[in-house]
Image (spheres, helix red, strand yellow):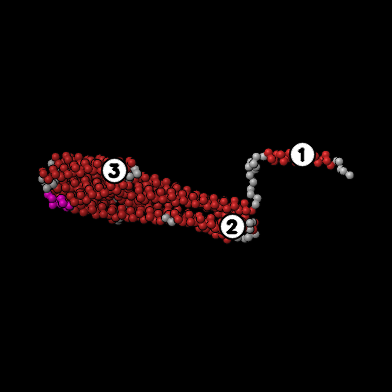
Amino acid sequence: MTDTTAAPAAAPRRARSARSAGRRRALPRGRGPLRAPRTVPARLYLWTAAVAVGIAGLFGAVHAGVAEARDGLQVVGRAAGPQAVNTGGLYLALSGMDAQLAGVLLIGREHSLGQGRDVSMAMYEQRRSEAGRAILETFDITRQNEQGRTTVQSVLDGLGEYERLAARAIVLAEQTRYSAGPPPREVLAVYRRATDLMHTELLPQAYNLTLESAAIVRRTYVSETDRATNALIRVGVAAVVLLAVLAAFQLGISRRFRRTLNPPLALATLAVVVLSGLALTSLARSSAHLREAKEEGFDTALTYTRARAISSTAAADQLRWLLDPDRAETYEQVYFDTSQTIAYVPAGNLADYYAAIAQAPLKGGFLQDADAADPVLVRYRAFQKTDRSLRELVGDGRTRQAIVLRTGTAVGTYDAYDLELSKLVGAGKAAFNGGIEQAETDLEDWDTGLPAGALAVLALVLLGVRPRLAEFR
């Protein structure tokens, strides 16, 4: 017997099923809700991809940090740093030329007076050669700096004019054949043009080159310090994220496959720890060595290079004071100001300065950090003592004796002081170059080590996943 009541009930169910099927067919393909992969192989692939992304993130963070550190080292260690010290040498050479010219003109026809005309002329030529080399080196270093190149070109042009005036003054001195002391007016007029050119144009330009280069070093150093800190943070964060992904991956595999440990994944995790630790250590050590190079090397070398340059102008001012009585008061004031720049003590004039520098501790200047027993300060005080004797002789009317002192004994006194300064400059340069080289060494293996490490970690991950995937084939 047929059940007639079941048919009406089945009809609504078939209608609802048809409507549901219609709605399912109406959904556009690919528009369904995103769902986590449900199969084990899909999950393994997803975790592997996550690890690969983490490896790429760590690789990128380390690579960027190393590249930024190298850029900073290039600017500080190979460009602006050497340029700053080199331009200090340019200032020293230019000032030395003017001092030797003044010495030649001061002794006139008495060529054997003091250290002698031949020695002074030889020193003049030596300083001129040093200035020429310094200009070429500075021009090469500043080839990427348009303003620096313009300044160097201006110094080069001005030096040519100075040499022309110096040669003219020497020829006139030979022609007039005057005794030691202030030269005839025609000689003095040409020398004034030369020395004014030197002190109003060439030396200020050389000094500005030094200051500009030093400013670049300071800015780059501050920027590099900030970048190094940021790089360490980026590498640390990338390493923590990658380690977290690896740990979660290891835990997931252990639970799913009932295995306590996946050896390749464990090795990959250990490799990430080692790679991250080495990267952080290298970046931190490179930054520390850069700091040592800047603070213990560059700052020292630049300070005493500038001290040598300024001291050379002080020595030249002594000669100019004897050579040009009409400007003697001006040169004496300039000498006093220069001395205060080298080693500052409270004093209102040279007489007070002589007394204070012999006893009081320094309150400022380039030699401020020198102890009383430091050879450089001992030699500087001897230099000032000689200057005092020089001016006392002139004050007593014994100008010739003052000239003999300045062109003879005083030369040795100044040279001894300059030698101590040059030793300090050399020590600073050695510390600077050593620090830069160590910083570069800290970063040198990452060009090959970083890609190799990243590939090794990825290979270990694939090695750990492959057997698990094989179980589902």
Residue receiving disc 3: 152
- Which mark sits nearer the N-terminus, 3 or 1? 1
Asked which secondary structure carries label 3, the reply is helix
Q: Which numbered dot is residue 84?
A: none
- Which mark sits nearer the N-terminus, 2 or 1? 1
Can you tell which quarter of the image residue 17 is in? top right
Asked if the stretch drawn in magenta spans residue 208, the answer is: no
The disc labelled 3 sits on which kind of residue? Val
Residue range of the region highlighted in magenta in the rendering = 110-119
Residue 69: x and y in percent read 42, 50
Asked which secondary structure carries label 1, the reply is helix
The disc labelled 1 sits on which kind of residue? Ala
Q: Residue at x 20, y 51 (%)?
A: 123
Asked if the stretch drawn in magenta spans residue 118, the answer is: yes
Q: Which numbered dot is residue 15?
A: 1
Q: Is residue 38 left or right of residue 340?
A: right
Q: Which numbered dot is residue 466?
A: 2
Residue sitting nearer the eye, 340 or 114: 114
Closer mark to the observer between disc 2 and disc 1? 1
Label 3 neighbour load within 10 Å: few <14, some 14-19, many 20+:
many
Label 1 neighbour load within 10 Å: few <14, some 14-19, many 20+:
few
Can see residue 233? Answer: no
Label 2 neighbour load within 10 Å: few <14, some 14-19, many 20+:
few
Q: Residue at x 35, y 44 (%)?
A: 144
Specify the quadrant that holds the C terminus: bottom right
Using the numbered discs, state the Cα–Cα distance from disc 2 to disc 1 in whole angstroms: 49 Å
